[in-house]
Amino acid sequence: MKLLTYQYNGKEAVGVLPATGDVIIPVAALGLEYDSMSELIQHATEEELAKLRTAAFALPIDGIPYDAATKVAPIPEPRQDVICLGFNYLDHVSESATFQEISIPGVPEYPVYFSKRVNRAVSDGGHIRSHPALDEQLDYEVELAVIIGRDARNVSVDQAEDYIFGYTILNDISARALQARHKQFYFGKSLDDSTPMGPWIVTADEVDFPPKLALQSFVNGELRQNSNTEHMLFSPSRVIAELSAGMTLKAGTIIATGTPGGVGSALDPPRYLRFGDVVECVIEGIGRLRNTVG
């Protein structure tokens, strides 16, 4: 099922998007008093999730017209920084050696982790702030984001699937000049409005594991990235097991699993995002995340 956050009549709420896609069923209308997606992920029982699934596929359906609601990122204000993977697709490893002036010999032996500060995630249809006074080398990165469903500590690779609540699309907007200047990712990845996410969460039961999903990015309709999550160097299971061995992954934790080749900074010549550009990130089985640089 698809779970989303939306605004209607001035109030932010959580709902279910039925297969018809034309209405939103508020979880409150089903007797579930969760004010945010983070709260639902943390506290919803299996019985409550089953109730939501039933509502998602029931006919006829009454609810809020989808077009009457204002879109919001599924987890608009994450409880903690987003955990990100760098160099998790081999073609991106190769191209990164050019624009980041780094040398990674062959396949990395271990995952490269960093974090991304998100004061508030940008919704589908929202604007990506360009920050021209700070950096004129703004870049896009389509990524599959994994949402942790319950606190994970010392989870084995074989158990990892059971800790995944669902998946969404994340565009890891990156300020390349800041990355180069500061010799690290954090600042250049964490500018305000640099985390478009959505349009909703698809729960894990709807996606085969491990995920083998086509993912693409487009800028002004031009295909830039085109790959499949099966080409990840380090799987979600490996990542969850490795991280949870030393830190507790709280329910609601977002893990961005890396981007494939085709980013703007690796093109010849580089093609950075400009004011008015429309960026679309598409992942099979999840949907399309569309944003405008402004």
Image (cartoon, rainbow, N blue to C red):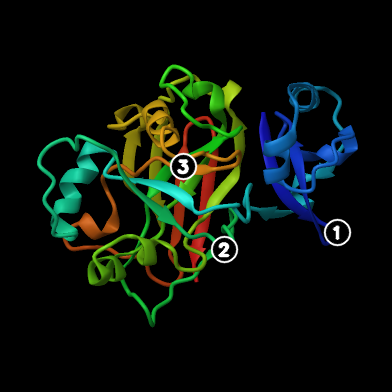
Q: Earlier in the sequence, mark 2 or mark 1?
A: 1
The quadrant of the rendering that contains the N terminus is: top right
**Residue pictured at 13% horizontal, 46% vertical:** 104
| Relative depth, front residue between 247 and 2 | 247
Residue at the extreme bottom: 133
Q: Which residue is mark 3?
A: 255
| Relative depth, front residue between 177 and 33 | 33
Is residue 39 visible in the rendered image? The answer is yes
- Which picture quadrant has residue 14? top right
Are circles 3 and 2 on residues that touch, CB within 8 Å?
A: no
User: Dot 2: within a 10 Å radius of its alpha carbon, few (fewer than 14), some, or many (20 or more) residues?
Assistant: some
- Which picture quadrant has residue 241? top left
Going by the numbered disc 3, the residue's amino acid type is Ile
| Relative depth, front residue between 79 and 188 | 79
Residue 272 on image: x %, y %: 31, 65
User: Dot 3: within a 10 Å radius of its alpha carbon, few (fewer than 14), some, or many (20 or more) residues?
Assistant: many
Q: Which residue is mark 2?
A: 119
Are circles 1 and 3 on residues that touch, CB within 8 Å?
A: no
Between the C-alphas of marks 2 and 1, the distance is 24 Å
Discs 2/1, front: 2
Discs 1/3, front: 3
| Relative depth, front residue between 160 and 290 | 160
Q: Secondary structure at mark 2?
A: loop
Q: In the rendered image of this protein, does residue 217 appear above or below residue 176? A: above
